[in-house]
């Protein structure tokens, strides 16, 4: 998977916009970040999962998903190793992060 693939998947979700945060791209819905690219380096992305989702993604794909260190990681921030990732699993993680962040009015309609 490439950063371009990650970006395309994130931007395909309703009302998602790309902005920048601390000099790297982020993806927001309802003005809240649900994913980022390029931190701590260009080979990574990040998705904001629930701690339970993080556990399962990390357990099922440990070469792809790793909890971010510190408090952010304990709350579900999960690093994505892009080169090791398959589009299908990262799409699921990005969708989960989007659903965790999106306003309730967006969740009542069908997504993906």
Image: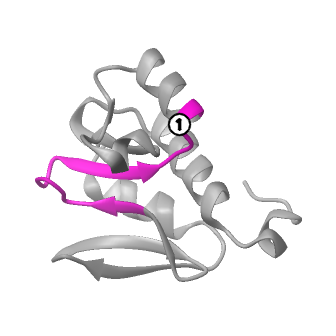
Q: Is residue 103 left or right of residue 101?
A: right
Q: Find residue 83 and report its image quarter.
A: top left
- Considering depth in this image, is 55 or 64 the residue closer to the camera? 55
Q: Residue 103, percent across and down?
A: 72, 73
15 above or below 67?
below
Name the residue located 18 percent from the left edge and 57 percent from the top edge: 39
Which residue lies under the disc numbered 1? 51
- Considering depth in this image, is 5 or 109 the residue closer to the camera? 109
Name the residue located 78 percent from the left edge and 71 percent from the top edge: 106
Q: Is residue 57 left or right of residue 107?
A: left
- Considering depth in this image, is 25 or 12 the residue closer to the camera? 25
Quadrant of the image containing the C terminus: bottom right
Quadrant of the image containing the N terminus: top left
**33 within the magenta span:** no
93 above or below 24?
above
Q: Residue 99, percent across and down?
A: 67, 57
Q: Residue furthest right?
A: 108
Q: Residue 64, percent across and down?
A: 32, 29
Q: Find residue 70 and report its image quarter.
A: top left
Q: Residue 111, percent across and down?
A: 76, 59
Q: Which residues are magenta?
A: 35-52
Assign a secondary structure to mark 1.
helix
43 above or below 83?
below
**Scheme by which the image is coloured:** one colour
**47 within the magenta span:** yes
Name the residue located 46 percent from the left edge and 46 percent from the top edge: 75
Q: Residue furthest left?
A: 41
């Amino acid at each position: 998977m490439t950063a371009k693939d990650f970006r395309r998947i994130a931007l395909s979700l309703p009302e998602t916009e790309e902005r920048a945060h601390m000099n790297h791209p982020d993806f927001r819905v309802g003005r809240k970040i649900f994913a980022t690219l390029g931190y701590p380096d260009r080979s990574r992305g990040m998705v904001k999962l629930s701690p339970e989702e993080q556990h399962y993604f990390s357990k099922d794909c440990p070469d792809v998903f790793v909890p971010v260190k510190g408090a952010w990681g304990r709350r579900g921030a999960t690093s994505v190793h892009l080169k090791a990732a398959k589009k299908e699993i990262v799409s699921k993680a990005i969708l989960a992060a989007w659903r965790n962040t999106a306003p309730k009015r967006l969740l009542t309609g069908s997504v993906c």
